[in-house]
Image (cartoon, rainbow, N blue to C red):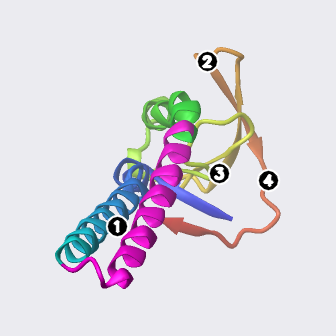
Amino acid sequence: MTFYTLKYIENNQNNSQAILNILMLVAAILMIFFVVLYLRDRFATKYRDLGIIALLFLLLFAGTQYEKYMQVNEQKPQITQIVPFMKSVARDENVNESDILVNSTSLVNGMIVRINSKDEDYQLNLNPDNNTYTLNRAHVIDHRVEVKN
């Protein structure tokens, strides 16, 4: 089972977005480069073909980016609520924020919350509007965990 710290969640919410943006920029630059080469020498059709391939990659990356954007908009309430939730649990349990670990990067009903300093696991139960929660003691079967800082 993988657990995430507050630091990890705050730092890694937009990493994949940056990679897709870089790939789109590279594909756009390649497309412009091949179009310029093709316009200089119209008899060299290989540049036109390479430009078309670069355009197709650009469209592929743009479609992937759009799909990712739609997923983020659907999950945005859960993603933005996980950080205040973890801080709230730390305050309620009188522990450091770094001692709170969760097994999900978004706020979902049924996720496991681990309080590291107490070596206790809890299952999260949210009310329908995600404004209140209860933590019920849970017992994890496999105690080998990976903690992502």
Decide whether the magenta segment is chiefly helix, strand or loop: helix
Give whichever of 19, 149 is nearer the camera.
19
Q: Is residue 35 left or right of residue 101?
A: left
> Does 4 appear above or below 111?
below
> Does 52 appear above or below 100?
below
Q: Residue furthest left?
A: 40
Give whichever of 30, 19 is nearer the camera.
30
Name which residue lies at 36% across and 60% down: 24
Q: Residues within 10 Å of mark 3 (few under 14, many from 20)?
A: few
Answer with mark 3 or mark 2, whichever residue precedes in sequence: 3
Reading the image, the residue beneath label 2 is: 132
Q: Residues within 10 Å of mark 1 (few under 14, many from 20)?
A: many
Q: Residues within 10 Å of mark 2 (few under 14, many from 20)?
A: few
Residue 137 on the magenta segment: no
Identify the secondary structure beneath mark 4.
loop
> Does 149 appear above or below 105?
below
Q: Residue furthest front?
A: 43
Reading the image, the residue beneath label 4 is: 139
Say if residue 149 shows up in the picture: no
**What mark, if any, has residue 27 been given in the picture?**
1
* Position in image of residue 33 (x %, y %): 22, 72
Answer with mark 3 or mark 4, whichever residue precedes in sequence: 3
Q: CA distance from mark 1 to mark 4?
A: 49 Å
Residue 44 on the magenta segment: yes
Say if residue 130 shows up in the picture: yes
In front: label 1 or label 4: 1
The amino acid on which the numbered mark 4 sits, given as a three-letter code, is: His
